[in-house]
Image (cartoon, rainbow, N blue to C red):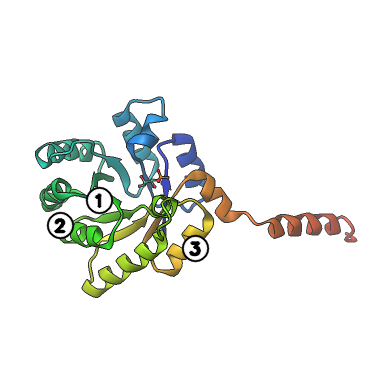
Amino acid sequence: MKFFLDTANLEEIREVASWGVLDGVTTNPSLCSKENIKFEDNIREICALVGGPVSAECVSLRSEEIVPEARALAKIASNVAVKIPVGLEGLKATKALAAEGISVNMTLVFSASQALLAAKAGAKFVSPFIGRLDDVSEDGMALIEEIVQVFENYRFGTEIIVASVRHPRHVVEAALLGADIATVPYAVMEKLVRHPLTDAGIERFLSDWKKVRK
Ligand code: E4P
């Protein structure tokens, strides 16, 4: 499973990159709005820190406008994946951009039918938002299960980015289902590695070590 960091914060990205487990980054307009840096400069700096794909989101709504906006974002660095919200205009733009070799991450996916159409249009990634589904009493992980099955049935190369991750169990369940990627906020990333029994075990070993005859 690949791990993307769901942030636009350079410090968080530097830190997780140093752990040796970072495969990419996803941003969105809300995450970028928290950073005190020009959007294009932020994406450029993130791309320089991360070897893998860095998602940068288009804000245009019509395909005629999405396509040039996406082309401009893709020019920032070779590892930019343009994020486009799923919809009829987004599908048209995805088809055109995929034909040009531009990686598209089709975002705001909330159904398997949306994911299927995104894959058919040529999206490199789809981003189902599981936390937001859970927030409205739906089952986000059931959606991942459906998309994994649909993509396997037809051998789509489109990769599933499990997005809107809220806690470590989301990551584990996504891994059990065979999702390609989880994009994880920094706070959840830290929680993935911690366990109170590990901390207690280290403490006990260190205190016993003091009693070892040297
Ligand atoms: C990533 O691609 C998404 O934009 C992000 O995971 C959304 O997360 P949220 O639902 O916590 O805003």
Q: Secondary structure at mark 3?
A: helix
> Horizontally, is 130 left or right of 103 in the view?
right
Q: Position of residue 77 (x, y in %)?
A: 26, 39
Identify the residue at image location x=31%, y=55%: 110
Q: CA distance from mark 2 to mark 3?
A: 29 Å
The answer to whether residue 99 is seen in the rendering is yes
Residue type at mark 2: give it: Ala
Residue beneath disc 3: 172
Q: Earlier in the sequence, mark 2 or mark 1?
A: 1
Identify the residue at image location x=65%, y=57%: 195
Q: Secondary structure at mark 2?
A: helix
2 and 1 marks in contact (CB < 8 Å): yes
Residue 121 disc label: 2
Looking at this view, name the residue that lies furthest to the front.
137
Residue type at mark 1: give it: Met
Q: CA distance from mark 2 to mark 1?
A: 10 Å
Q: Position of residue 130 (x, y in %)?
A: 39, 55
Q: Position of residue 138 (x, y in %)?
A: 40, 58
The quarter of the rendered structure image containing the C terminus is bottom right
Q: Secondary structure at mark 1?
A: strand
Residue 159 disc label: none
Residue beneath disc 1: 106
Residue type at mark 3: give it: Val
> Horizontally, is 100 left or right of 112 in the view?
left
Q: Nearer the viewer, residue 25 or 18?
A: 25
Q: CA distance from mark 3 to mark 1?
A: 23 Å
Q: Earlier in the sequence, mark 2 or mark 3?
A: 2
Answer yes or no: disc 1 within 8 Å of ligand 1. no
Q: Nearer the viewer, residue 15 or 148?
A: 148
The answer to whether residue 179 is seen in the rendering is no
Q: Position of residue 189 (x, y in %)?
A: 52, 50
3 and 1 marks in contact (CB < 8 Å): no
